[in-house]
């Protein structure tokens, strides 16, 4: 089992939580990004640099992750593909994507994208606050324990 982190837009606080968990439970963690991210390389973690460009990190994760791995991403289409491939997928706010909810999440994402293209809505996920970080930490810890016991 490995942990894959879509790191281009992953907040620092979330990376730190994942790094600590990786060390604690000794699980290989790969941070995938198209830019250097200091501080993510360690005994159990590494940085995989990908070419610059839209979706390059997503493509790398999709092509290299395996059933039974864990992924952290806020990219809904990538999450949908990974869930179909048998991965546990969370976003950086602690939401867990499953076969039961990913279709609805993908439809909602597509609808919001269309509304933004018409200028009806602006793109904003809001800034991350301490509550968001705590929600992620709790969800990640819970899911990591469950996933390990499968």
Image: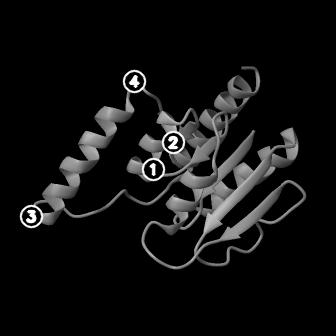
Distance Cα–Cα, label 2 vs label 4: 14 Å
User: Which label is found at residue 88?
Assistant: none
Q: Residue furthest front?
A: 63
Dots 4 and 3: beta carbons under 8 Å?
no
For marks 4 and 3 on the same chain, the one whose residue lies earlier in the sequence:
4
User: Which element carries disc 1, helix, strand or loop?
Assistant: helix
Q: Which residue is mark 4?
A: 100
Q: Which residue is mark 1?
A: 78
In this orientation, does residue 10 appear? no
* Residue 114 left/right relative to 96: left
Distance Cα–Cα, label 2 vs label 1: 6 Å
Q: Taking 65 as reference, is 119 above or below it?
A: below
User: Which element carries disc 3, helix, strand or loop?
Assistant: loop
Dots 3 and 1: beta carbons under 8 Å?
no
Dots 2 and 1: beta carbons under 8 Å?
yes
11 or 34: nearer the eye?
34
Q: Which residue is mark 3?
A: 118
Dots 1 and 4: beta carbons under 8 Å?
no
Of circles 2 and 4, which is in front?
A: 2
User: Which element carries disc 4, helix, strand or loop?
Assistant: loop
For marks 1 and 4 on the same chain, the one whose residue lies earlier in the sequence:
1
137 or 25: nearer the eye?
25
The image position of residue 49, as x and y in percent, is 66, 73
């Amino acid at each position: 089992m490995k942990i894959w982190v879509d790191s281009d837009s992953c907040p620092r606080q979330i990376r730190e939580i994942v790094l600590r968990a990786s060390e604690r439970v000794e699980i290989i963690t790969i941070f995938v990004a198209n830019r250097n991210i200091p501080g993510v390389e360690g005994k159990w973690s590494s940085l995989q640099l990908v070419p610059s460009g839209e979706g390059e990190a997503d493509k790398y994760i999709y092509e290299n992750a395996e059933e039974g791995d864990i992924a952290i991403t806020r990219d809904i289409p990538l999450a949908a593909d990974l869930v179909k491939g048998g991965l546990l997928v969370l976003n950086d706010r602690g939401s867990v994507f499953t076969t039961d909810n990913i279709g609805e999440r993908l439809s909602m994402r597509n609808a919001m994208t269309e509304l933004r293209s018409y200028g009806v809505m602006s793109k904003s996920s809001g800034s991350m606050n301490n509550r968001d970080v705590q929600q992620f930490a709790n969800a990640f810890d819970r899911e990591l324990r469950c996933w390990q016991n499968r």
